[in-house]
Image (spheres, helix red, strand yellow):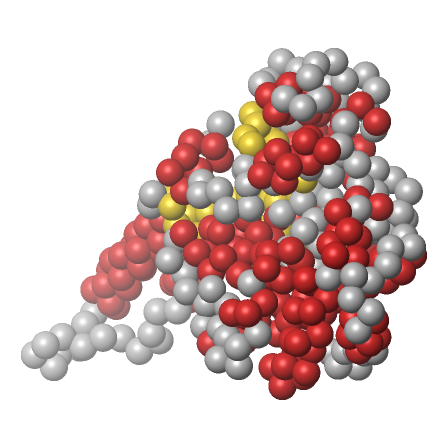
Amino acid sequence: MSGVVRSLSRCLLPAEASREPGGGKQSTSERDAAQEREARRRSREIDAMLARERRAVRRLVKILLLGAGESGKSTFLKQMRIINGKEFDKKALLDFRDTIYENIIKGMRVLVDARDKLGIGWQCGENEKQGMLVMSWEGRGGAPGVDPGEFQLYVPALGALWADAGIQAAYSRRAEFQLSESVKYFLDNLDRIGQLSYIPSKQDILFARKATKGIVEHDFVIKKIPFKMVDVGGQRSQRQKWFQCFDGITSILFMVSSSEYDQVLMEDRRTNRLVESMNIFETIVNNKLFLHVSIILFLNKTDLLVDKIRTVDIRKTFPEFRGDPRRLEDVQAFLVTSFSRKRRNRVRPLFHHFTTADTILQDNLKDIMLQ
């Protein structure tokens, strides 16, 4: 490459001969010597530039975030942006606000519909009208989000419905239908979010849910090391795009929602979500393309897992589980073992971390990525 660049540099030299300071003409040999010196100088500069670029490429840590839908990949990227001081501009904040409004209305529609299908009565008969109002929402005709003026029309109904024991009873059975995990957080904060002056907080942004479509890249510098994190959609329809991102990968972070052992996929409503994650992981970890790539397993949403094991026995989905189904350490050990057994080559250790929706990883991220 440097030889080609040297040849090009010679071609870029000015065609006219340079003149001596005294105005006299240089001889042909002097002119050739000057051109040769200039060519060597330019060649050295170009070689130095190429060397710097090669060092930068070698130092770049390119991380691919993989996992099934709703595993927390996009939330992790938002965490990284926040803890590295990359503020969201006004447009981004307003987009998040509209997304949050939509998350709330769609979530309540799911709860109202589930209450009806589960045969749960209203605590307050008047809330039937409020439920009908929320169910009448049709969105922006395909455009994402909900604008503030429209959202204000639904705030009183949303508050009344969330306070109704019938909706709370439906929520307690949420494993039987598809409901975003962020709905409770937003509805619990409806008084604040329902203000006309509302601007999302950083915590709100972490809980905002919008499916990733296509390929999204984010660049960070952590402890003077450049990181490029690549996020691709986790839904089945998006996974064919994963193979476009495999070139030059340093590490793969495989995200798993550890609390979803009793839930099914939104795509087919039959396949267990945790089983789906294990199957995807098996495909990735045994791919020859990743023979020399570090794969780190992030068992995410530990906070939700803590709540889940109190009420839902993991043995209903995984009868091979041995241990105390109410003990967090036993359940986590089982999950790590289950994923580890998917590897054909177990010589290299499987690095794993238990994380939550707001875990701060900056202090040890460098060590994690370079394992």
Residue 129 placement: quadrant: bottom right
Q: Extreme front residue here?
A: 124
On the image, the x and y values in percent for residue 318 come to 81, 24
State the image coordinates of residue 277 (x, y, percent, origin top left): 75, 36
* Viewer-proximal residue among 244 and 141: 141
Q: Quadrant of residue 11?
A: bottom left
As displayed, is residue 78 above or below residue 337? below
* Residue at (61, 48) in percent of width and height: 73
**Identity of the residue furthest to the left in this view:** 22
Q: Residue at x 53, y 77 (%)?
A: 195
- Percent x, y for residue 37? 25, 58
125 on left or right of 91: right
Q: Is residue 198 left or right of residue 341?
A: left
Q: Position of residue 349 (x, y in %)?
A: 58, 18
Tally the marks. Answer: 0
Judge whether 249 appears above or below 338 on screen: below
Residue located at (91% from left, 42% from top): 270
Q: Is residue 371 visible?
A: yes
Question: What's the residue at 84%, 46% (across, down)?
Answer: 176
Query: Quadrant of residue 137 in the image?
Result: bottom right
Residue 56 seen by the camera: no
Query: With 26 as the anchor, is 355 left or right in this view?
Result: right
Name the residue nearer the viewer: 338 or 369.
338
Q: Toward the viewer: 264 or 162?
A: 162
91 up-or-down from 52: above or below: below
